């Protein structure tokens, strides 16, 4: 009887370990923003059920005296995808406040193209899409037993290893892929689904923040001053910028 119990426990333990496996993909991410150039080493932790994507190391080179409204240094943006529920939940900040946003995936509608190329040892196919104001080209492989991609990109029949906007504003390129025989690691911040808002609500809050900035600058401005904020984000949020004249 003891041997039987031990055998059952061993089988359960073995089954749990078989299921606890994932892939870790390291990406180099680049954003060429007029306010400054962002470069980052980012990681995608992904299995067949869910994935996490977030930055490990970030460098920022600021141009001139431009102000960055969107970045909060103490918060690492985390993108969690639940493939069975077809949802993405991610953190994003405005000034000193962090928001959690929930959307349905896939967010992009892709057009498959005939070109192929190898990225590392993996044969990849090409696809393109238009997403929130930018045209993107992606390269994905079907040679791995996972489906998904970095950041908000998803919806292809494989895992996305490279993606870039046609204007050179935003690029993500894989550097290495490794297989891990354990569960997905915990993200650096807690994802608070219970207070998540929609993308549209986030855009509205961003617009409100720009208006607050305009009022604050107007109160400080001297006669003849003209102050302008250029809004340059990865996704089109329907905001042109902020301007104060006095």
Image (spheres, helix red, strand yellow):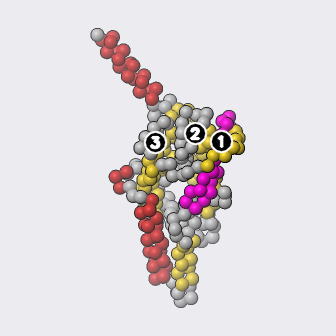
Q: Earlier in the sequence, mark 1 or mark 3?
A: 3
SS assignment for the magenta stretch, majority: strand
Look at 29% across and 10% down and name the residue there.
Answer: 1
Q: Secondary structure at mark 2?
A: loop
- Circle 2 packing at 10 Å, graded few (<14), some (14-19), many (20+), is many
Look at 46% across and 64% down and name the residue there.
Answer: 203
Distance (Cα) linking label 2 and label 3: 13 Å
Residue 122 forms part of the magenta stretch? yes
Residues shaded magenta: 120-139
Distance (Cα) linking label 2 and label 1: 9 Å
Q: Secondary structure at mark 1?
A: strand
Looking at the image, do the residues carrying marks 2 and 3 touch, with CB atoms under 8 Å apart? no
Q: Quadrant of residue 59?
A: bottom right
Q: Of residues 73 and 213, which is closer to you in this image?
A: 213
Counting from the top left corner in percent of width and height, residue 140 is at 62, 42
Query: Extreme left residue here?
Result: 1
Q: Of residues 141 and 151, which is closer to you in this image?
A: 141
* Tag shown at residue 158: 2
Q: Quadrant of residue 235?
A: bottom right
Residue at numbered disc 1: 125
The vertical placement of 160 against 103, above or below, is above
Distance (Cα) linking label 1 and label 3: 22 Å
- Circle 1 packing at 10 Å, graded few (<14), some (14-19), many (20+), is many
Counting from the top left corner in percent of width and height, residue 29 is at 61, 51
Residue at numbered disc 3: 83
The vertical placement of 121 against 44, above or below, is above
Residue 4 forms part of the magenta stretch? no
């Amino acid at each position: 009887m003891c041997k039987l119990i031990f055998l059952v426990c061993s089988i359960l333990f073995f089954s749990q370990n078989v299921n606890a496996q994932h892939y870790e993909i390291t990406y180099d991410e680049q954003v060429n923003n007029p306010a400054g150039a962002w470069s980052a080493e980012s990681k995608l932790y992904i299995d067949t059920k869910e994935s996490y994507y977030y930055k490990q190391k970030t460098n920022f080179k600021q141009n001139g005296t431009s102000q960055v409204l969107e970045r909060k240094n103490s918060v690492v943006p985390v993108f969690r995808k639940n493939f069975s529920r077809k949802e993405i939940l991610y953190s994003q900040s405005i000034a000193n406040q962090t928001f959690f946003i929930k959307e349905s995936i896939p967010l992009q509608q892709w057009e498959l193209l005939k070109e192929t190329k190898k990225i590392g040892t993996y044969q990849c196919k090409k696809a393109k899409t238009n997403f929130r104001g930018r045209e993107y080209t992606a390269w994905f492989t079907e040679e791995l037993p996972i489906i998904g991609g970095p950041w908000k990109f998803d919806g292809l029949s494989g895992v996305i290893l490279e993606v870039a906007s046609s204007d050179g504003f935003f690029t993500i390129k894989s550097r290495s892929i490794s297989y891990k025989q354990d569960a997905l690691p915990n993200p650096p911040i807690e994802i608070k689904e219970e207070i998540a808002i929609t993308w549209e609500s986030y855009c509205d809050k961003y617009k409100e923040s720009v208006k607050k900035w305009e009022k604050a600058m107007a109160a400080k401005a001297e006669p003849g001053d003209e102050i302008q904020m250029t809004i340059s984000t990865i996704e089109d949020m329907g905001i042109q910028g902020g301007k104060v004249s006095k």
